[in-house]
Image (cartoon, rainbow, N blue to C red):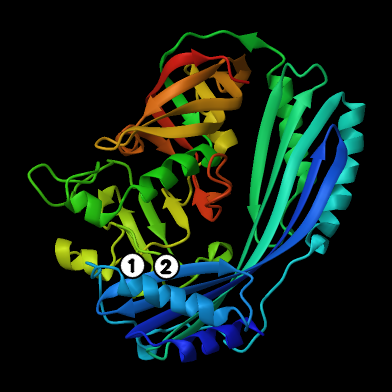
């Protein structure tokens, strides 16, 4: 059966007051290399069906892989049993009607797919870079992933919506022959036609050369230049922590002392805008809510709700938090659902990373990326983590060597108030969150007094 047939049959089998059904068809391809040699490749396929039954305001949710026409009724009945044994959901709302949906996609089209062929031209360039690296005494390691997911969403209200989402990323790590130096770079992509392998490899070679001189520095607060990748990792965590319900309940950094949220407060004196937009070109994402379960930030009752372009921070002022229809009633703020991309804007003519470094005269750290990021205190959104694969010292507008790695302790909200320079935004790949969130565009930032809390032995 086609995914559309499964969805329609599941709805026809339902005896619940309301029913929402989602079919997710996913194909994935990957390529891996190490020591200047391709080591593995593969293609996989997954078919998942989610049935959400609504009975007397309670929900029952069952997700199962590989559902067939013969096993479909078991899934539907299991969801109904779960709903019958549950309590009324506090976020219960009328199901979204078809006339509320602006962009529904082509319901009748078959699922979109990928294959190992997605890496065709890139793989040829990769082979050429293996030979170049070998001659230069460098070793290249890395991973490329491409996934295409087609989601079919329908409900007993008559809603029918479909979306195809391509997601790809390319990561490369270069090491010196004796493994004493390491550098990383990553690229987010939709189809790999825009991955410039020679440029990535050339940048890594330059960074390995920078690391030929090693400088030991103690822990402390340093002026620090964050590349777009590191900015993305910090801003994604800020975004994931910006649920309106938790803020309204006094649980997060966005809670106003005495009650309510901090919407309307200035977080930065710089013209910083943090926004999401489902129609943002190469960062485009699903334009309606797809919620397989409910949480403080999502509601299954909102499935199919149109997702608007939203400014979370506008010119330095907190403007919106992630809202469901239910949380919007509690907070009195507009409905602003979660969006699967994130864009940070500063000035349109801002410097790129190289220009920002070149304009730096005082002793400043230049990071490559962050990893192992964890929350220390949700009330301030204090995060900790490690630098990785190259921390460089900039003096007099030039990189003069690499320094040891550090553990950092910083709040991305507090950090917004200490930005001294902001560059132009570009599409980037977060290092820490690349498995979960790849659609980002961020600028490089110069931040004063970035807290390197201790020296790390990580490499």
What residue appears at the point 32 percent right and 82 percent down from the top-left corner? Answer: 95
Q: Quadrant of the C terminus?
A: top right
Residues marked 2 and 1 touching at CB (< 8 Å): yes
Q: CA distance from mark 2 to mark 1?
A: 6 Å
Q: Does 9 sit above or below residue 312? A: below
Can the viewer see residue 288? no
**344 relative to 265 in the view: left or right:** right
| Residue bearing mark 2 | 291
User: Dot 1: what SS?
Assistant: loop
**18 relative to 216 in the view: left or right:** left
Q: Along the polypeptide, which appears first: circle 2 or circle 1?
A: 2
Which of the labelled discs sits on residue 456, or is there none?
none
Q: Quadrant of residue 107?
A: bottom right
Q: Does 158 sit above or below residue 191? A: below
Q: Quadrant of the N terminus?
A: bottom right
* Figure label count: 2
Residue furthest left in the image: 258
What residue appears at the point 34 percent right and 65 percent down from the top-left corner? Answer: 337
Q: Nearer the viewer, residue 92 or 219?
A: 92
| Residue bearing mark 1 | 299
**Residue 254 placement (x, y as % from top left):** 23, 46
**Residue 45 placement (x, y as % from top left):** 71, 65
User: Dot 2: what SS?
Assistant: loop
What residue appears at the point 39 percent right and 57 percent down from the top-left corner? Answer: 275
**Residue 390 placement (x, y as % from top left):** 62, 24
Can the viewer see residue 353? yes
**425 relative to 17 in the view: left or right:** right
């Amino acid at each position: 059966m086609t995914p559309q047939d499964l969805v329609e049959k599941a709805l026809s089998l339902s005896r619940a007051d309301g029913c929402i059904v989602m079919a997710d068809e996913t194909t994935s391809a990957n390529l891996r290399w190490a020591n200047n040699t391709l080591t593995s490749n593969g293609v996989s396929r997954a078919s998942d069906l989610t049935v959400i039954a609504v009975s007397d305001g309670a929900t029952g949710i069952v997700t199962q892989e590989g559902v067939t026409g013969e096993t479909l009724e078991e899934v539907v009945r299991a969801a109904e049993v779960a709903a019958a044994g549950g309590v009324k959901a506090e976020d219960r709302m009328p199901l979204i009607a078809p006339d509320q949906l602006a962009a529904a996609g082509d319901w009748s089209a078959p699922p979109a797919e990928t294959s190992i062929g997605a890496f065709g031209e890139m793989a040829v360039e990769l082979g050429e870079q293996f030979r170049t690296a070998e001659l230069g005494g460098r070793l290249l390691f890395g991973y490329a992933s491409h996934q295409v997911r087609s989601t079919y969403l329908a409900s007993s209200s008559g809603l029918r919506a479909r979306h195809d989402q391509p997601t790809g990323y390319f990561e490369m790590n270069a090491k010196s022959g004796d493994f004493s130096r390491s550098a990383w770079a990553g690229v987010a992509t939709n189809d790999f036609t825009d991955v410039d392998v020679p440029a990535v490899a050339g940048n890594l070679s330059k960074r390995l050369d920078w690391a030929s001189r090693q400088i030991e520095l103690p822990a402390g607060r340093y002026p620090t230049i964050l590349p777009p990748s590191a900015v993305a990792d910090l801003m994604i965590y800020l975004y994931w922590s910006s649920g309106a319900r938790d803020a309204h309940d006094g649980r997060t950094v966005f809670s106003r002392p005495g009650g309510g949220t901090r919407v309307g407060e200035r977080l930065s004196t710089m013209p910083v805008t943090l926004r999401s937009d489902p129609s943002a070109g190469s960062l485009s994402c699903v334009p309606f809510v797809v919620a397989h379960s409910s949480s403080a930030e999502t509601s299954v009752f909102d499935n199919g709700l149109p997702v608007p372009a939203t400014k979370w921070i506008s010119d330095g002022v907190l403007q919106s938090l992630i809202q469901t229809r239910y949380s919007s009633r509690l907070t009195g703020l507009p409905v602003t659902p979660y969006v699967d991309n994130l864009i940070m804007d500063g000035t349109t003519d801002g410097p790129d990373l190289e220009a920002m470094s070149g304009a730096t005269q005082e002793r400043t750290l230049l990071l490559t990326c962050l990893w192992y990021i964890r929350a220390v205190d949700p009330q301030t959104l204090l995060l900790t983590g490690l630098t990785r694969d190259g921390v460089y010292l900039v003096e007099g507008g030039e990189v003069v060597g690499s320094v040891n790695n550090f553990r950092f302790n910083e709040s991305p909200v507090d950090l917004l108030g200490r930005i001294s320079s902001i560059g132009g935004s570009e599409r980037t790949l977060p290092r820490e969150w690349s498995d979960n969130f790849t659609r980002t565009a961020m600028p490089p930032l110069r931040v004063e007094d970035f807290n390197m809390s201790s020296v790390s032995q990580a490499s």
